[in-house]
C-alpha cells in the first residue's frame, strides 16, 4: 500500500519530473510509472473498453491470436483424410482427430496388425496464430504439457513439433513460464511449480508492449486524462516515446532466439516494457565458423546485423529516440495491424523515407535495373529481406530481417561447426555468467563436449552452486557431491538441492540424499518430479509410509505423471496394498509403455502375487526398452 501511495504521489508531482525528462528523453525506465512491480495487469478486455479501435484490428495479428482455448474455429489445421505421423526412433504413430467438436491427439504403437499401445489426450489450448504453425497443449489437472503433433500451415501438413525429431518426449514436454510468457499474455505460475498455471490470458495482449495497466486504468477512472498530443501519459508505457534501445528491447523480449539465462534473483515475468532486457536476462547463442545461423525467432538480432539499423542507431546515443533517424521494429510494423493487412507499399515507404532524395541515407535510390525492379514489383522486402527456411523449425519460411543486398542464395546456410557461445543482448558477460551459459546450453540444447570444455576453463569463477550444476550436467555425480559441504541448505535454491540429492543418491549415499530431496521439495512443493524422486528414495529407505503421503498429495493434483504413478504404486506395494499398487503402476505403463521402472515394479508385484508368466512379460518389455538393464536380466534369470 505504501508503494502505491508513493507512485500516486509521483503522479501529482509529475510536471517537474516531465520538465527534466523533456530536456533529454533520458532513461525512460525511470519515467513511466507502471514499471513498478506493485502495478498489476488488468487484461485485454479492460483495455478494449476505451481502445476498441486498436483492439478490433490487433486481435487479428499474429500476436493477438498467439494463444487460446482449442476449438475448430481457432484451429488452422486440417483434420480430414489425415495420415498418421510416424516416429521411427520412438516407434510411435500420432493421429489428430475431432470428436464432438473437440480436438484430440492419439499416440499408438503397432506390432504387426495388433495395436499394443494407445493413448489419447484432449487438446485444451492452441499455441501459434496459424501464420506458420499451430502447436497443441493438453492439461493434467492444472499442469500444462505440449502434445506431440504440430500443424505446419504453410506446407499444410502435420508433423512432430520442433525438437521432437531428436527427442520425442511424447505427451511429457512441460510448458514452463519461459515458454508460456513468450507465446502468450503475462501468465501466472503457481508458486513452487514448473508448469502449473493459475492464470492464462488468451494471446499476447496490450500489456506485453505497454506494461501493466492497473495504474493507468485507476487514473482514467478518476478522470485524470492526459492530452497525449502535448505530453506523455506517464501511467502507461508508449513504446514510441522510448529511446530506441529500450524500444527494441520490448520486441526482442520474445523475438530473440537463444538460451535465456536469468540474472540472479530475477524471474521471466519481471521484465516490463521500458526496462533494459539485459537487466532481467541475457540471451546466448552458438558462434559458428561460417557465420550466424538463421533461426525462426531471431528477428531482432537479424535486424540489428543490418547496416540500415547500425547507421541509424548510434551506439553511443542509446538514451533518446529520434523518429527521423532511428530505425526500429515499429518503423515498419504497426503492432496493432496484421502484416497480412499491411500492404507492401507501407513497408516500401519505410525504406523510401531514407532511400530517396529527401531521405537521410547516402543511397538515394535502388541500384537494381528497371527490369529487375519491375520483376520484383518494386517490392523492397522481396529482394532485401527474402523468405527462407530456418535452422530450427521445419516446413516453415519467414522473412529474414537481416537487410542487405540480394545474394541469390537461401538465408539458411551451412554455418560450420560451433566454436563457442556469445551474448546476443547486452554487454559482454563476465566469466561466471558465461560459465553458466555453457553448462546450460550443454544440458538443454546440445550435449557437445565443446561447451563443457569451454565451461571447464571458466570453472574457477563459478562458485559451489554452479559447480554442482556443471558436474551434474556432465553426469559426474562424485564431483557434484563433493560440493555438499560448501553449500548452506537453507540459503540455496531448489534445483541445487535436487542436484545434490540426486548426486549423493547416485554415489550410494541414500541416507544423505534424503535431506536434499526434502529441501528441494520444500522449496518447490508443487514440483511433481521432485516429489517423485523423494518418494522413490523413501521407498528404498524403508520409509514407504512417508513416501505414500508425499506422493499422494501431488497425485491429487496431477494423475497422469508416469514417474509419480510408478513410485506411488511402489510405495503402496511396500505398504501391503497390492490391488492399489497394481492399479497405479498399470496406469503408468498404459500411459508410457517405455518407462522402465514401471515395468520392473509391475514384474516385482506380479512375483509377489505368484503370477510368474505376467512377471516374465513385464521383464521382456523392460529388456526391449533397455537390453542392458541388469536388474531385469537378474530377475529373468531367477525365474524358472
Image: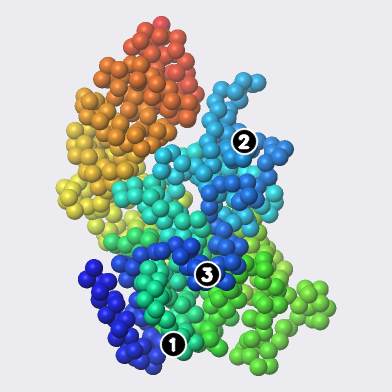
Estimate the x, y position of residue 71 in percent, counting from the top left. 59, 46
Mark earlier in primary sequence (1, 2)? 2
Circle 1/circle 2 CB separation < 8 Å: no
Which of discs 2 and 3 lies nearer the camera? The answer is 2
Q: Quadrant of the C terminus?
A: top left
Residue at the right extreme, as displayed: 371
Query: How dense is the environment of label 2, judged by Cα within 10 Å: few (below 14), some, or many (20 and up)?
Result: few
Distance from disc 1 to disc 2, alpha carbons, whole Å, reads 55 Å
Is 238 drawn above or below residue 577 in the view shown? below
Q: Quadrant of the N terminus?
A: bottom left
Query: How dense is the environment of label 1, judged by Cα within 10 Å: few (below 14), some, or many (20 and up)?
Result: few
Mark earlier in primary sequence (2, 3)? 2
Distance from disc 3 to disc 1, alpha carbons, whole Å, reads 29 Å
**Residue labelled with disc 3:** 300
Residue 231 circle label: 1
Q: Is residue 265 left or right of residue 631?
A: left
Q: Is residue 321 left or right of residue 39?
A: right
**Residue labelled with disc 2:** 99
Q: Is residue 554 left or right of residue 446?
A: left
Amino acid at each position: 500500500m505504501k508503494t502505491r501511495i508513493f507512485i500516486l504521489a509521483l503522479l501529482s508531482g509529475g510536471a517537474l519530473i516531465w520538465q527534466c525528462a523533456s530536456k533529454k528523453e533520458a532513461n525512460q525506465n525511470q519515467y513511466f510509472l507502471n514499471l513498478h512491480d506493485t502495478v498489476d495487469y488488468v487484461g485485454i478486455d479492460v483495455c478494449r473498453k476505451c481502445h476498441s479501435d486498436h483492439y478490433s484490428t490487433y486481435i487479428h495479428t499474429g500476436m493477438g491470436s498467439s494463444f487460446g482455448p482449442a476449438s475448430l474455429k481457432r484451429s488452422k489445421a486440417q483434420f480430414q483424410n489425415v495420415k498418421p505421423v510416424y516416429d521411427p526412433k520412438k516407434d510411435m504413430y500420432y493421429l489428430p482427430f475431432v470428436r464432438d467438436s473437440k480436438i484430440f491427439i492419439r499416440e499408438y504403437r503397432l506390432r504387426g496388425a495388433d495395436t499394443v499401445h494407445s493413448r489419447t489426450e484432449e487438446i485444451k489450448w492452441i499455441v501459434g496464430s496459424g501464420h506458420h504453425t499451430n502447436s497443441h497443449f493438453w492439461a493434467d489437472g492444472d499442469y500444462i504439457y505440449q502434445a506431440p503433433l504440430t500443424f505446419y500451415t504453410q506446407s499444410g501438413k502435420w508433423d512432430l513439433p520442433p525438437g521432437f525429431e531428436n527427442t520425442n518426449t511424447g505427451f511429457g514436454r512441460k510448458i514452463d513460464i519461459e515458454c508460456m510468457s513468450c507465446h502468450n499474455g503475462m501468465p501466472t505460475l503457481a508458486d513452487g511449480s514448473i508448469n502449473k498455471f493459475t492464470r492464462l490470458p488468451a494471446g499476447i495482449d496490450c500489456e506485453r508492449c505497454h506494461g501493466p495497466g492497473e495504474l493507468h486504468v485507476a487514473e482514467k477512472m478518476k478522470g485524470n486524462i492526459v492530452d497525449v498530443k502535448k505530453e506523455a501519459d506517464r501511467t502507461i508505457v508508449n513504446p514510441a516515446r522510448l529511446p530506441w534501445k529500450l524500444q527494441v528491447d520490448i520486441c526482442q523480449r520474445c523475438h530473440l532466439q537463444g538460451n535465456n539465462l536469468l540474472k540472479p534473483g530475477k524471474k521471466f515475468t519481471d521484465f516490463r516494457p521500458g526496462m533494459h532486457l539485459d537487466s532481467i536476462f541475457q540471451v546466448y547463442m552458438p558462434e559458428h565458423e561460417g557465420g550466424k545461423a538463421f533461426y525462426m525467432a531471431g528477428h531482432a538480432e537479424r535486424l540489428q546485423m543490418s547496416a540500415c539499423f547500425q547507421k541509424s542507431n548510434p551506439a553511443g546515443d542509446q538514451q533518446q529516440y529520434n523518429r527521423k533517424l532511428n530505425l526500429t521494429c515499429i518503423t515498419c510494423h504497426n503492432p496493432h495491424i496484421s502484416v497480412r493487412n499491411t500492404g507492401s507499399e507501407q513497408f516500401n515507404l519505410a525504406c523510401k523515407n531514407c532511400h530517396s532524395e529527401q531521405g537521410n541515407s547516402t543511397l538515394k535510390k535502388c541500384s537494381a535495373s528497371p527490369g529487375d525492379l519491375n520483376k520484383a514489383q518494386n517490392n523492397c522486402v522481396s529482394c532485401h529481406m527474402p523468405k527462407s527456411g530456418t535452422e530450427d523449425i521445419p516446413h516453415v519460411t519467414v522473412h529474414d530481417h537481416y537487410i542487405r543486398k540480394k545474394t541469390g542464395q537461401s538465408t539458411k546456410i551451412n554455418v560450420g561447426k560451433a566454436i563457442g557461445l556469445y551474448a546476443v543482448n547486452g554487454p559482454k558477460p563476465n566469466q561466471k555468467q558465461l560459465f553458466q551459459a555453457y553448462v546450460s546450453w550443454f544440458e538443454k540444447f546440445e550435449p557437445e563436449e565443446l561447451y563443457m570444455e569451454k565451461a571447464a576453463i571458466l570453472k574457477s569463477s563459478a562458485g559451489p552452486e554452479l559447480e554442482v550444476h556443471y558436474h551434474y550436467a556432465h553426469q559426474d555425480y562424485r564431483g557434484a557431491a563433493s560440493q555438499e559441504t560448501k553449500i548452506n541448505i537453507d540459503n540455496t535454491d531448489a534445483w541445487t538441492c535436487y542436484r545434490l540429492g540426486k548426486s549423493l543418491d547416485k554415489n550410494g549415499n541414500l541416507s544423505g540424499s534424503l535431506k536434499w530431496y526434502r529441501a528441494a521439495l520444500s522449496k518447490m512443493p508443487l514440483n511433481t518430479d521432485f516429489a517423485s524422486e523423494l518418494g522413490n528414495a523413501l521407498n528404498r529407505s524403508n520409509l514407504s509410509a512417508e513416501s505414500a503421503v508425499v506422493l499422494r498429495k501431488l497425485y491429487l493434483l496431477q494423475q497422469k505423471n508416469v514417474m509419480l504413478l510408478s513410485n506411488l504404486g511402489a510405495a503402496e506395494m511396500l505398504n501391503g496394498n497390492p490391488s492399489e499398487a497394481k492399479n497405479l503402476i498399470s496406469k503408468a505403463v498404459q500411459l508410457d509403455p517405455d518407462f522402465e521402472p514401471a515395468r520392473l515394479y509391475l514384474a516385482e508385484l506380479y512375483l509377489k502375487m505368484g503370477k510368474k508368466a505376467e512377471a516374465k512379460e513385464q521383464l521382456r518389455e523392460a529388456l526391449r526398452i533397455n537390453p542392458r538393464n541388469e536388474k531385469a536380466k537378474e530377475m529373468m534369470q531367477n525365474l524358472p
